[in-house]
Amino acid sequence: MVEITRRSALAGALINIASVPYTQAMAFAPQAGQQAPAYYRYKLGEIEITTVNDGVGALPIDDGFILNVPKDQVNAYLRSIFMEPNIYSGPYNPVLINNGKQLALLDTGQGEANLTTSKGLNGRLLQNLKAAGVDPKDIDLVILTHYHGDHINGLLRADNSLAFPNAEILVPEMEDKFWMDDGNMGRAATPRMEFNFKNIRRVMTKDVRTRLRPYQWNKEVMSGVSSVATIGHTPGHTSFNVTSGDKSLFMQGDVTHAPFLFARNPGWHLFLDVDPVAAEATRRKVYDMLASERMMVQGFHYPFPAIGHVEKTASGYREILVQWSPVL
Ligand SMILES: [Zn+2]
């Protein structure tokens, strides 16, 4: 039996290259040096859904990153799942929903201005929409899950004009009430909360406010798409049941951030959760439901294309991402 070792594999590769006749032309194409556009389509019954990636965010992991877990334990966990320690790479995945009558965009990513400041790491939504053949002018509705920057900044272009000039902007009523309240802003207890209040006021320009339409929970916001209260991450955080015929899907927003951290460790309290205890309770309730009903989930911070199923484990839940399909 031939034993395959790293050394023998390497030796084989060298022999193969050496055996190429010197007269055969070798094409040295220049390296591309950039990533492919990232959008992914699938059908849910009669509804066409497209994940349109906005990039990833990189957050440093310090002792306050997970409020109830020391940094060393978080880093040990990241190493165990083959990820870099000391840095949290959270993906951003807005979603297009086309129900045949209206085209909606669910959440908007970090915004075009961030493309430069992040050196291309995020703020890629408009580029990827273009690659997907979608004109931002054709979007009828922008539906927001909550008011954190990675979900609302993309309402504005780099010059602060409207990114989706013909869209109505549907926002959770509770979310808008909480963040637009000056009393709540005055009571902001952490620099992070202060930052969020200020950022929301920056994004909520007159042009944006003019197009705003608050929605309530347990209501259909467009045909086939109904709002569900999933509070904790923010006071008005909202998810969506998407249904067509006998097919259904749960669009979770930020019930978990990246599932490889917070679905697998549902008791971990991320510093971005406004009410971490409520966020954990919501997370466990939603993930118990997803696992027991074997329901498909789309997650804004899931790895692209951000769709999967969930199973229960001894310590939490595990996400199983869908297989790429070349046809709809
Ligand atoms: Zn988020």
Image: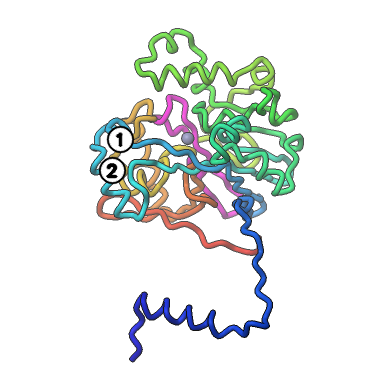
Which residue corresponds to mark 1?
66
On screen, residue 95 versus residue 12, left or right, reads right
Residue at figure coordinates x 49%, y 53% from the top left: 296
On screen, residue 177 versus residue 221, left or right, reads left
Q: Are marks 2 and 1 in contact (CB under 8 Å)?
A: yes
Q: Which residues are magenta?
A: 229-252
Question: Toward the viewer: 94 or 156?
Answer: 156
**Residue occupying the far bottom of the picture:** 1
Q: Residue 1: image x %, image y %?
A: 33, 91
Which residue corresponds to mark 2?
74
Inspect the image, locate mark 1, and give the three-letter code of the amino acid beneath it.
Ile
Q: Quadrant of the image for the C terminus?
A: bottom right
Q: Give the SS element for disc 1.
A: loop
Q: Earlier in the sequence, mark 2 or mark 1?
A: 1
**Looking at the image, can residue 227 be seen?**
yes
Q: Is residue 247 above or below residue 102?
A: below
- Say whether residue 293 is magenta: no
**Residue occupying the far front of the picture:** 22
